[in-house]
């Protein structure tokens, strides 16, 4: 099971988005690197218990202890020859087929926290529950169905999009951003679909809200040790498109930072974060 992983040399710094695994003292855990804290410990998202095949926590601090072995995965779903087979296993899963509205988010989730070779290995070892149980836990489907706070559910779903984007990737988004002290912004995406289509699907969600902003978010790499995105509010459906002033994007970026402090967001006027795929 460890073959696809590379031992992490002491002193090596990994980029945000890297999959990290820690084994030691009876623990076998894996997560998505967000950033390093001031003491050099890793802040991880979507931490998996690889011994039990369950989702442990949305966030956590990896503070290595003596005897721990650390590994990282250098490949990705965008480059690995095992990607097609791994994704095919997910797409034929009955719960994936049943929950059409979650399909893109499920794909984003697994590509952020698993290596494609791992998923293929799960199939070979007859241990696909190590893949399917965390998905059910994350999205509260199947055996783990339960009603959750809509606001939290909404922003956790958007967090998965941010985690999954690689440098140069972009998504369209809708947001509810209000100038109220205790207001918690909400964000929603279905990938690179046009904003009008995104708004139509949002109406069917448990956490439906009336959006005030819409635009594009594009992953740019790393800034100040955090995964970095550029953000615009240049939706023609909700705003003024290429004529959208900078202050509107500043409000959207500030709201993103409020909800997702482990990332960096740089606002741009107009449609400055527009990606390579067509969206509006």
Image (cartoon, helix red, strand yellow):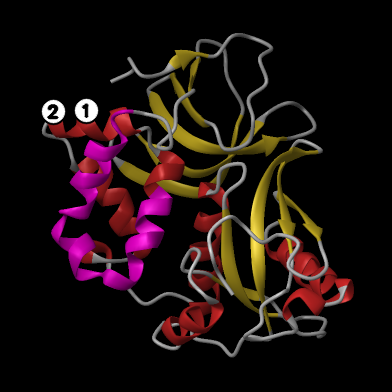
The tag on residue 121 is 1
In depth, the one of 263 and 270 nearer the eye is 270
Res. 188 in view:
yes
Of the pair 112 and 207, the residue shown nearer to us = 112
In the image: residue 27, left or right of residue 61: left
> Which image quadrant is residue 136 in?
bottom left
The crowd level at tag 2 (other Cα within 10 Å; few <14, some 14-19, many 20+) is: few
Q: Which residues are magenta?
A: 81-109
Tell me whether the residue at label 2 lies in contact with that at label 1, contact meaning CB atoms closer than 8 angstroms: yes
Q: Is residue 176 above or below residue 229?
A: below
The C terminus sits in image quarter: bottom right
Q: Residue at x 30, y 28 (%)?
A: 117
Question: Element type at marker 2?
Answer: helix
Q: Which residue is mark 2?
A: 124
* Residue drawn at the location 54% of the way across and 65% of the way down: 278
* Residue 84 drawn in magenta: yes
Q: Is residue 105 above or below residue 51?
A: below
65 to the left or right of 233: left
The crowd level at tag 1 (other Cα within 10 Å; few <14, some 14-19, many 20+) is: some
Q: Residue at point 38% right, 61% down? A: 104
The chief SS type of the magenta part is helix
SS at circle 1? helix
At a point 36% along the width and 77% down the height, the residue shown is: 147
Distance between the alpha carbons at the discs numbered 2 and 1: 5 Å
Of 47 and 255, the residue lying toward us:
255
182 falls in the magenta region: no
Of the 4 image quadrants, the one containing the N terminus is top left
């Amino acid at each position: 099971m460890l073959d696809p992983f590379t031992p992490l040399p002491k002193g090596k710094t990994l980029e945000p988005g890297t999959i990290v695994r820690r084994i030691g003292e009876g623990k076998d855990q894996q997560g998505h690197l967000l950033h390093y804290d001031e003491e050099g410990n890793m802040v991880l998202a979507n931490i998996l218990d690889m011994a039990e095949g369950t989702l442990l926590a949305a966030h956590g601090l990896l503070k290595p202890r003596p005897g721990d072995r650390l590994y990282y995965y250098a490949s990705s779903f965008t480059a690995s020859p095992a990607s097609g087979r791994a994704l095919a296993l997910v797409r034929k899963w009955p719960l994936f087929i049943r929950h059409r509205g979650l399909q893109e988010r499920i794909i984003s989730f697994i590509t952020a926290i698993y290596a494609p070779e791992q998923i293929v290995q799960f199939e070979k070892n007859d241990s696909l529950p190590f893949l399917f149980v965390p998905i059910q836990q994350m999205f509260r489907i199947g055996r783990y169905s339960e009603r959750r706070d809509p606001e939290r559910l909404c922003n956790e779903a958007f967090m998965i999009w941010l985690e999954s984007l690689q440098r140069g990737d972009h998504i369209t988004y809708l947001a509810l951003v209000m100038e109220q002290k205790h207001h918690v912004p909400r964000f929603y995406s279905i990938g690179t679909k046009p904003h009008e289509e995104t708004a139509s699907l949002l109406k069917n969600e448990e956490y439906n809200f009336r959006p005030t902003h819409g635009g594009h978010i594009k992953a740019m790499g790393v800034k100040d040790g955090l995964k970095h995105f550029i953000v615009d509010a240049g939706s023609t459906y909700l705003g003024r498109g290429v004529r959208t002033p900078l202050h509107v994007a500043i409000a959207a970026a500030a709201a993103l930072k409020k909800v997702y402090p482990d990332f960096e967001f740089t606002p741009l006027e107009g449609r400055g974060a527009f990606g390579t795929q067509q969206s509006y």
